[in-house]
Image (cartoon, rainbow, N blue to C red):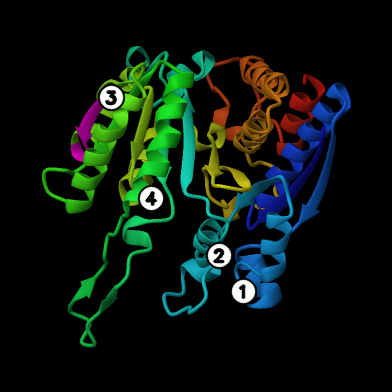
Amino acid sequence: MNLNIALLPGDGIGPEIVGEAVKVLDAVGKKYGHTFNYKKGLVGACAIDATGDPYPAETHKICRESDAVLFGAIGDPKYDNDPSAKVRPEQGLLRMRKSLGLFANVRPLVVFDSLVERSPLKAERVKGADFVCIRELTGGMYFGRPQGRSEDGNTAYDTCVYSREEVERILKVAFEQARKRRKLLTVVDKANVIATSRLWRQIAKEMAPQYPDVQVDYMFVDNAAMQIIQRPTYFDVLVTENLFGDILTDESSVISGSLGLLPSASLGSDVALFEPIHGSYPQAAGKNIANPMATILSAAMLLEHVGLQQEGAAVRAAVEKAIAQGVVTEDLVDASMPGQTARSTTEVGDFVAAHV
């Protein structure tokens, strides 16, 4: 296969972790006879610094002309600490999602047996947890209009809007994901209070007969937040709207014990984007200490998305081997294991690439 991949390293540790994922992709290409062609684009704070725009037109062009996008991270303290900044790195991320039509964020959560003790939850509670959160990305309160605040600074308002088309397409992704897994779909909403949630539930009930092999249950978001902690092994596929999904996916990510292990995909009608769920971690930038595994696993999701299932499985197996053998960065080092020391970002990437 000949694949064109847009690389958007972004800010902070982004260039380092994306570099290791590329190293692993190149190992896959060499082993299985594929050619991966890369083209880099600017996004986030580095794009503002270079062009004044967090998502330049040239970057959008690179993404549209690619088969898939591998993205690092966005964010810089100089913007985080300046509430008056008119242009912010995160605006580039929202615009990228909207302009590329990336409406479905897919976040798998798997607790590795060798790391089960690192979870903040009891081992017996999280062992075997394996579920996927599907979050709608381009609608809801984050994009609703009108929004604003009063001139005296005492009142503010945001509008949550969803159309039938937006809800149907994300539910279709969720039903199809459930079909590939344990065939259990949990629709998360707040239908007892919020009108858009009632629309979500209505449409989900209308669509369910089209997927008779999938069991569907409905859960209010506050209960879902509790159940994810109390019994994470119950869930298979969860689907929800943008704001609820933002919160629940971050809550879920903690269960594994490290943000540095969790990949994600953002899917649309054309190009798909793959990224680690963690941020830019600017304190670690340039120190060769950041965990590249989430980005490497995002590359595995990319491979599987384009039909290279065996190749994606090989990457996952290599990551699992690195974890099992203690070839990990400082965030995953187990102090109780004699002789285990933190490895650098590049050492972890080298190990995974060598074992593909």
Q: Position of residue 174 (x, y in %)?
A: 41, 33
Label 4: few (<14), some or many (≥20) within 10 Å? Answer: some
**Drawn side of residue 101 relative to residue 200, left or right:** right
Q: Residue at x 33, y 56 (%)?
A: 140
- Badge 4 is on which residue? 166
Q: Position of residue 295 (x, y in %)?
A: 63, 38
Q: Secondary structure at mark 3?
A: strand
The secondary structure making up most of the magenta span is strand
Q: Earlier in the sequence, mark 1 or mark 3?
A: 1
Q: Secondary structure at mark 2?
A: helix
Distance from Cα at disc 1 to Cα at disc 3: 43 Å
**Drawn side of residue 95 relative to residue 202, left or right:** right
Label 3: few (<14), some or many (≥20) within 10 Å? Answer: some
- Badge 2 is on which residue? 92
Q: Position of residue 81 (x, y in %)?
A: 46, 70
Q: Residue at x 68, y 33 (%)?
A: 306
| The residue stretch that appears in magenta | 217-222
Amino acid type of disc 3? Val
